[in-house]
Image (cartoon, helix red, strand yellow):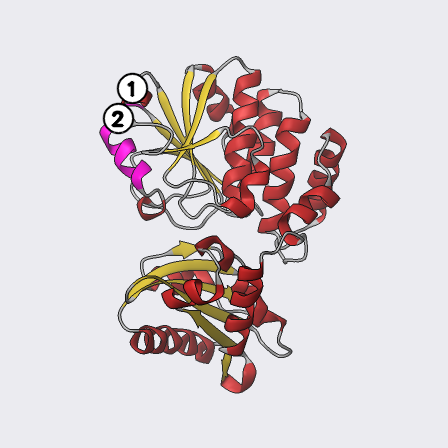
């Protein structure tokens, strides 16, 4: 589905005071997309504020050195947003992923637009600018820059490079094609430093995250003769290892490093007997279809959802669903 960029430009030109928002538990694509879009809109003379449902995780704070991203109820209150005339959501199309900002959207009688690359969408009452073939929301923001005719600045390029690099697994996922590398080259030419961004992302490990990784690896189990690997994290693990919630990011991918593994799953306990589940696939298994069975969504190769129940019951339900999908392809 191609984005109607002419219509997008018309919407941007007809508004002046923007709120930008992305999803809770934000990753680099979420954060990089809102920051890149903020720079684009400010180049056009727009009044822009970025407000998310949760604060930026400490390990990703490097992406926003000017602290431009605010959190509702922490840095900004609802009354501070009453002068806005349009709301833009990036990198999600689901109410559940907006957190407290979902309530803000529902309470404000202003237009809502969504820029996203995920499959599926809730009835947000929004105008959607979506392309599910895009490798990252950051790619769509880069396209928006071209459509609006703005300059690719270093301030824009740095977060967008982080967005695209992380959502493509540092360009190793199947979603990364020739165009992705061309985009990376343009972002580097505009001022992004891959070495600096990689170092901030992957060479700033805390002892807590390393210990949590060990816990995750020790619990890995396999099914279907090794084709499916899974693991889990309990609330008590954070206290025992010294890790924080954001340290769980990408740990599911450790399961895919096992030879012969085609799909993986991790359950992360959020509150007692409430789990966030992440699916990964490098075969015919469609993670987005799996996630939708449990009220979630995402992409074919990576998706997520939530599930309630005991660890054993939740894991069994999820594994039954994954194994049933595998049997279709046998």
Q: Quadrant of residue 239?
A: bottom left
Q: Nearer the viewer, residue 152 or 104?
A: 104
Q: Is residue 97 magenta?
A: no
| Label placed on residue 222 | none
Mark 1, Cα crowd under 10 Å, few <14 / some 14-19 / many 20+, is few
For the question of whether residue 259 can be seen, the reply is yes
Q: Nearer the viewer, residue 10 or 124?
A: 124
Give x and y (percent) for residue 240: 44, 67
Residue appearing at x 63%, y 71% in the figure: 257
Residue appearing at x 36%, y 47% in the figure: 97
Secondary structure category for the residue under label 1: loop
Q: Nearer the viewer, residue 261 or 242?
A: 242
Q: Residue furthest bottom?
A: 225
Residue tagged 1: 82
Q: Main secondary structure of the magenta part?
A: helix
The magenta segment is 100-110
Q: Quadrant of residue 325?
A: bottom left
Of the image marks 2 and 1, the number of the one nearer the N terminus:
1
Residue tagged 2: 108
Give x and y (percent) for residue 157: 65, 32
Give x and y (percent) for residue 244: 46, 56
For the question of whether residue 139 can be seen, the reply is no
- Position of 324 with respect to 45 (left or right) is left
- Position of 268 with respect to 1 (left or right) is left
Residue appearing at x 46%, y 64% in the figure: 279
Q: Is residue 103 magenta?
A: yes
Is disc 2 in contact with disc 1, using a CB cutoff of under 8 Å? yes
- Position of 258 with respect to 95 (left or right) is right
- Position of 207 with respect to 325 (left or right) is right
Alpha-carbon distance for marks 2 and 1? 8 Å
* Disc nearest the viewer among 2 and 1: 1
């Amino acid at each position: 589905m191609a984005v109607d960029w002419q219509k997008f430009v018309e919407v941007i030109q007809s508004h002046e005071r923007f709120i930008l928002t992305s999803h809770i538990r934000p990753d680099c694509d979420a954060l990089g997309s809102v920051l890149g879009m903020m720079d684009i809109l400010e180049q056009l003379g727009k009044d822009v504020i970025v407000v998310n449902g949760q604060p930026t995780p400490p390990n990703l704070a490097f992406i926003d050195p000017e602290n431009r991203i605010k959190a509702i109820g922490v840095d900004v209150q609802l009354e501070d947003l009453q002068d806005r005339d349009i709301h833009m959501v990036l990198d999600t199309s689901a109410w559940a992923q907006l957190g407290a900002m979902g309530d803000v959207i529902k309470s404000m009688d202003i237009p809502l637009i969504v820029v996203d690359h995920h499959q599926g969408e809730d009835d947000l009452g929004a105008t959607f600018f979506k392309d599910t073939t895009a490798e990252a929301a950051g790619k769509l923001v880069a396209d928006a820059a071209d459509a609006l005719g703005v300059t690719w600045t270093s301030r824009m390029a740095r977060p967008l490079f982080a967005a695209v690099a992380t959502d493509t697994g540092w360009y190793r996922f199947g979603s990364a094609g020739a165009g992705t590398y061309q985009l990376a080259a343009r972002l580097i030419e505009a001022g992004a430093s891959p070495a600096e961004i990689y170092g901030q992302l992957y060479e700033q490990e805390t002892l807590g995250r390393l210990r949590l990784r060990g816990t995750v690896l020790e619990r890995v189990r396999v099914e279907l003769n090794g084709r499916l690997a899974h693991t889990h994290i309990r609330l008590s693990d954070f206290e025992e290892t010294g890790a924080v919630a954001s340290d769980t990011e990408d740990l599911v991918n450790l399961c895919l490093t096992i030879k012969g593994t085609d799909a993986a799953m991790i359950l992360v306990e959020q509150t007692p007997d409430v789990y966030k589940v992440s699916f990964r696939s490098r075969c015919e298994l469609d993670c987005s279809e799996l996630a939708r069975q449990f009220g979630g969504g995402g992409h074919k190769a990576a998706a997520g959802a939530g599930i309630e129940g005991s660890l054993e019951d939740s894991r069994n339900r999820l594994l039954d669903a994954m194994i049933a999908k595998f049997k279709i392809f046998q």
